[in-house]
Amino acid sequence: MTSMQRIPFDHIRSRVLGADFYQFNPGGKVGPRLPYAHSFIYITEGRGTVTLEGTTYEAEPRDLFYIEPSMEHSYAADPQQPMVHASVYVDLLWDSTSKPVGDKRLNCYSHAAYDPGLCAARVAFEEEIRLPARTRVPQHSDWMEAYKSVIRSFEKRDPWNLIELRSLFEQFLTGFARFLAHPYEPSDPRIRRIIDWMNGHLKDAFHLSSWSRSLQLSEAYLYELFRAETGYSPQHYFLRRRLEQAKAELRETNDSVTSIAERLGFVSIHYFSRQFTRVQQESPQQYRKRIRSYEA
């Protein structure tokens, strides 16, 4: 694994190494392979799967994948609706890799041939911003326009290009981080009403059927409306909101993991730990220990 550097978010100095659109053939496969840079993969069309370090994710339009340097990954396209990737490869610290801009060898298909000395540094942000392996991007996210502009601008190759690419990429990354840090603010008042209820009833069970009757909408329509507005299903959104509260309590209280899980309405400590680890990529105990070691 490559080195990890802990930095404030505003110390990023990005250098975009590659950016392109890639059309898979029906049923096509790529990998497994190891990247030398931070890879952001946005699905613009089609379907398939993305496998990261042994975990396989379904991929469909508006899914954004983040692959850290040296993380083994592979892709498989749907036979009928093959994926199209909008891909950006970047060194977040400008010169932590000696790979040049435009290098076509930003991934290696062999562990034996992989050179860790060419790998960009991984980063951990002091603000506890974590980039998830997969994010469902809400519709009309303006920060994704900056992402697409990185790809459109990559081939310009004029004296100002590196500055332009850095500006566009960091505009995207800032918007992405802001989206991760704060719940998405939906425009539909019905969805805002549901989210307000969620924020005040984290320990209670959420029933989509009750809300569909209250709002006089079908469950299927309300489900799709919620997902279009927030990027998540109602159940997934509610789970993530509970987990954000759990993180706050793990940071700010000495309450046991069990009592936090019970207070937030999780059916068991095992279910809570499994969901927390899946989203946070570390257990509740590991998260608390890591955060407090930084504060010591």
Image (cartoon, rainbow, N blue to C red):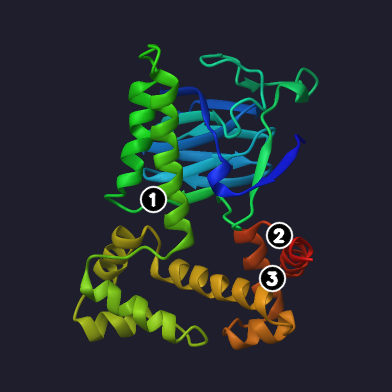
Q: Which residue is mark 2?
A: 282
Q: Nearer the viewer, residue 156 or 277?
A: 156
Q: Residues within 10 Å of mark 1 (few under 14, many from 20)?
A: many
Q: Is residue 98 above or below residue 249?
A: above
Can you identify the residue that label 3 sits on?
273
Total number of numbered discs in the rendering: 3
- In-image side of 128 versus 239 (left or right): right
Image quarter (top left, top right, bottom left or bottom right) of the N terminus: top right
Identify the residue shown where x is 37% and y is 57%.
231
Q: Amino acid at mark 2?
A: Glu
Between marks 2 and 3 in the image, the one whose residue lies nearer the viewer: 2
Q: How would you rate the neighbour count of disc 2 (Cα within 10 Å): few for under 14, some for 14-19, many for 20 or more?
A: some
Q: Quadrant of residue 73?
A: top right
Seen at 24% across and 86% down, the residue is 214
Residue located beneath label 1 in the image: 137
CA–CA distance in space, label 3 to label 1: 25 Å
On screen, residue 172 versus residue 223, left or right, reads right
The residue that appears at 43% across and 45% down in the rendered structure is 63
Say if 78 sits above or below 270 in the image: above
Q: Residue at x 38, y 11 (%)?
A: 158
Observer able to see residue 25: no
| Secondary structure category for the residue under label 1 | loop
Residue 276 sits in quarter: bottom right
Residue in front for this viewpoint, 78 or 240: 240
Q: Earlier in the sequence, mark 3 or mark 1?
A: 1
The location of residue 76, given as percent across then percent down, is 52, 33
Amino acid tagged 1: Val
Between 50 and 70, the residue placed more toward the observer is 70
Name the amino acid type tagged 3. Answer: Ser
Expressed as whole percent of the image width and height from the top left, the position of residue 192 reads: 29, 74
